[in-house]
Image (cartoon, rainbow, N blue to C red):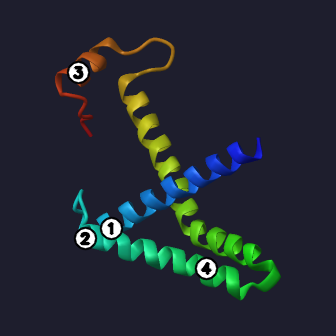
Amino acid sequence: MSIITVGLISSFFVTSADSATFVLGMQTAFGTLSPANFVKVVWGLLLSSIAYVLLLSGGETGLNALQSAAIIAALPFSVVVILMTIAFYKDANKERKYLGLTITPNKKRMKEYIENDGQIKR
């Protein structure tokens, strides 16, 4: 069972690292959907060296340092996700009100909405 667990954890880390290097490569290559392999390799080396340095610098608590760095780095993204959720709720509520979706929809507004390809008149 432990061999299967190690295999699954390893595949998780490899796929996560591959995804991270791909996304970072796209961002640093001005949004191209197929960044050069050199860019992805550089990002992979940078990410692995950062993790290695954090593990070494922490001594016996190296893993705690790595976890703390990951949490600190994720905090701004968490704020962005919360703001996106609020924006989505506001937009969905505005559309619900426009369509009159309370108990029964406003058929006239629904017809206008469909005719305008989903564009809400403001």
Q: Residue at x 43, y 28 (%)?
A: 96
Q: Nearer the viewer, mark 3 or mark 1?
A: 1
Name the amino acid type tagged 3: Ile
Kind of element beneath mark 1 = helix
Q: Quadrant of residue 30?
A: bottom left
Q: Which residue is mark 2?
A: 29
Q: Which residue is mark 4?
A: 52
Kind of element beneath mark 4 = helix
Q: Earlier in the sequence, mark 4 or mark 2?
A: 2
Q: Earlier in the sequence, mark 4 or mark 1?
A: 1
Q: CA distance from mark 3 to mark 2?
A: 39 Å
Q: CA distance from mark 3 to mark 1?
A: 40 Å
In the image: residue 85, left or right of residue 114: right
Q: Which residue is mark 3?
A: 114
Name the amino acid type tagged 2: Ala
Q: Earlier in the sequence, mark 3 or mark 1?
A: 1
| Mark 4, other Cα within 10 Å: few <14 / some 14–19 / many ≥20 | few
